[in-house]
Amino acid sequence: MPELPEVETVRRILTKYVVGKTITDCQIFWNKIIKAPTDSKIFIKEVVGQKINQIDRMGKHLLFILDDYVLISHLRMEGKYFFTKKDEPGKWQHIMVLFELDHQFQLRYHDTRKFGTMHLYDKRTYLEQAPLNKLGYEPFDERITVSYLKNAWKNKSQPIKTTLLEQNVIVGIGNIYANEVLFASKIHPGEKTKNLTDQDYQNIIDNTKVVLQQAINEGGTTIATYHPEPGMDGKFVQQLKVHGRNKMKCVNCQNEVDKIFVNGRGTYYCNYCQKLK
């Protein structure tokens, strides 16, 4: 699933191609992608004629800022956007939504798993609507402090890995970067959240910023099918310290990296560097 660095990379690429263009038509081939409005015909009516003025991001969500509306797109597992000429060939069986743009261009939303979602809301109220209304702060937001995390997490008995994956306190962290942040912070992924110290909280804050910024700089992480545009891979995969490195030597201590499952999520860590309290 694309996490914050991958979605930010996609945002920057799409900005180059589609900002300033007008949606002249729209076709929906998988109605379940459209979550709001629930009637896809209304979605099409409202989106056609709208100019794409800007593309923003909140956590893992892309925000297409139109004249009167905001289109919120969550890529989920396999969602991808392709900016193409109108007559360019494509894998049409995987195109779920097609936006016709002016000057004979198209923006094709491609999703082999069909898990992605789109919400279209009035610009005046979109922040008050699901899914954005329950999101926490961006990892780089100065409001994320030790006291903020303690207040949110002090009574949680669940593993810190699980807590990091929730999006209601800090947004944008998924499985890959949770593993990397916890390794950098020397925190066992199975540690109960309520057992964390002030220093643990500070380490999470600091290392989340560092890891995510490095990943953004490298265009994200390509492990399987993530390609922000044709022929482009996310190069942060070359800098991963633990994720995907089961049985390989820890970069810090040379002991083996282990793989376990925390609430069903594949989790990589060093049992020597990241000890339970």
Image: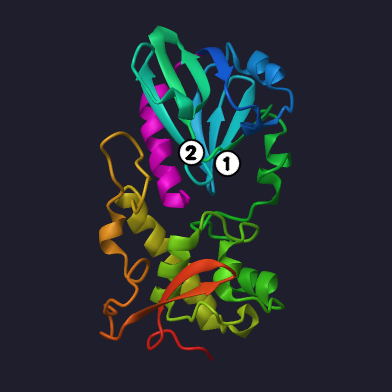
Answer with the quarter of the image where residue 116 lies. Answer: top right
Q: Which residues are magenta?
A: 1-22
Above or below, 134 against 34 in this view is below
Instruction: Give the x, y percent position of residue 257.
Output: 35, 79
Which residue lies at the image location 52% right of the left edge and 73% below the top edge? Answer: 261
Along the line of sight, which residue is nearer the eye, 205 or 108? 108
Above or below, 212 against 146 in this view is above
Residue 150 lies left or right of residue 207; in this view the side is right
Residue 205 lies left or right of residue 183; in this view the side is right
Main secondary-structure element of the magenta-colored stretch:
helix
Q: Residues within 10 Å of mark 1 (few under 14, many from 20)?
A: some
Residue 213 lies left or right of residue 166; in this view the side is left
Is mark 1 in CB contact (under 8 Å) with mark 2?
A: yes
Residue 145 makes an appearance in the image: no
Residue 79 is labelled as 2
Nearer-N-terminus badge (1/2): 2
Residue 217 is labelled as none
| Residue bearing the label numbered 1 | 115
Which residue lies at the image location 30% right of the left edge and 58% below the top edge? Answer: 237
Marks 1 and 2, Cα distance to the nearest angstrom? Answer: 8 Å
**Secondary structure of residue under mark 1:** loop
- The kind of residue tagged 2 is Gly
Instruction: Give the x, y percent position of residue 75.
Output: 52, 41
